[in-house]
Image: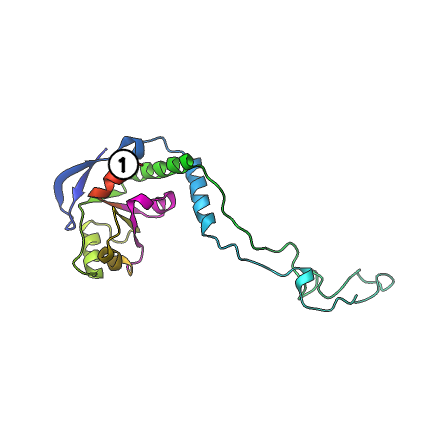
Amino acid sequence: MELAVYNIKGEDTGRKVTLNDEVFGIDVNEHAVWLDVKQFLANQRQGTHKSKERSEVSGSTRKLHKQKGGGGSRIGDINSPVLVGGGRVFGPRPRDYRFKLNKKVKQLARKSALTCKAADCQITVVEDFTFAAPKTKEFLNVVKNLKLDNKKLLLVFTSQDKNVSLSLRNVPGASMMQAADLNTYAILNNGALVLTESSVEVVNKF
């Protein structure tokens, strides 16, 4: 697949880049994508949730009334889970949600995500650029010229560009990432994928 290269004014430069069919044209494996996204989201969880159980609630352990003969239910202390203010039954405890996923499965998922983006024509290639100084207005002009305004977009650079990064950090729905750090979730969580010309070479080697 070939895509035209645009400049920051939204003009076709006349150059084209070739997307590797082994990365952008494979048979999509939806299960691999699901596993990779599930792992990514699980890794973001702190797992510090905790609720107090019966033995941890502050309160008297005196038996409220005798076991039999009162005509009421059997009941123990005031910390019982069936009473207001009592402990919680089988409440959440701190735990680690991370799980292992094979490297080849993650690679397959990332290629599948890129294939979906290519098939849906959601990839734009722009020539390498930078800003002389951080300017949000300049970045918004670039987005408008590329006709990607009102879209959630991910800008992919070969290496971190401080001025561009500072220019887009206040723009809702805009994010930036290095090509080597691309992951399945980041690719799918954006409506438009903007690759710089040099970053295409890195992504083609995935």
Q: Residue at x 56, y 55 (%)?
A: 94
Give SS at disc 1.
loop
Quadrant in which the C terminus appears: top left
Above or below, 181 relative to 17: below
Q: Residue at x 49, y 55 (%)?
A: 46
Q: Position of residue 126 (x, y in %)?
A: 19, 45
Q: Residue furthest left?
A: 14
Say whether residue 188 is left or right of residue 129. Answer: right
Q: Quadrant of residue 174?
A: bottom left
Residue 164 percent location from the top left of the image: 23, 55
Figure coloring = rainbow
Q: Residue furthest right?
A: 69
In the rendered structure, the answer to whether residue 130 lies left or right of residue 39 reads: left
What is the number of callouts on the image? Answer: 1
Q: Residue 68's x, y, as percent?
A: 86, 61
Q: Disc 1 marks which amino acid?
A: Asn
Q: Which residue is mark 1?
A: 204
In the rendered image, residue 170 lying in the magenta stretch gets the answer no
Q: Position of residue 32 (x, y in %)?
A: 43, 36
Q: Tell which of 170 and 180 is nearer to you.
A: 180
**Residue 107 shown left or right of residue 70 in the figure:** left
Q: Work out which quarter of the rendered image holds the N terminus and state it.
A: top left
Q: Looking at the image, is 39 positioned above or below residue 58?
A: above
* Occupied quadrant, residue 17: top left
User: Which residue is rendered at x = 29% and y = 61% of the image?
Assistant: 170
Q: Residue at x 21, y 49 (%)?
A: 147
In front here: 42 or 75? 42
Q: Which residues are magenta?
A: 171-193
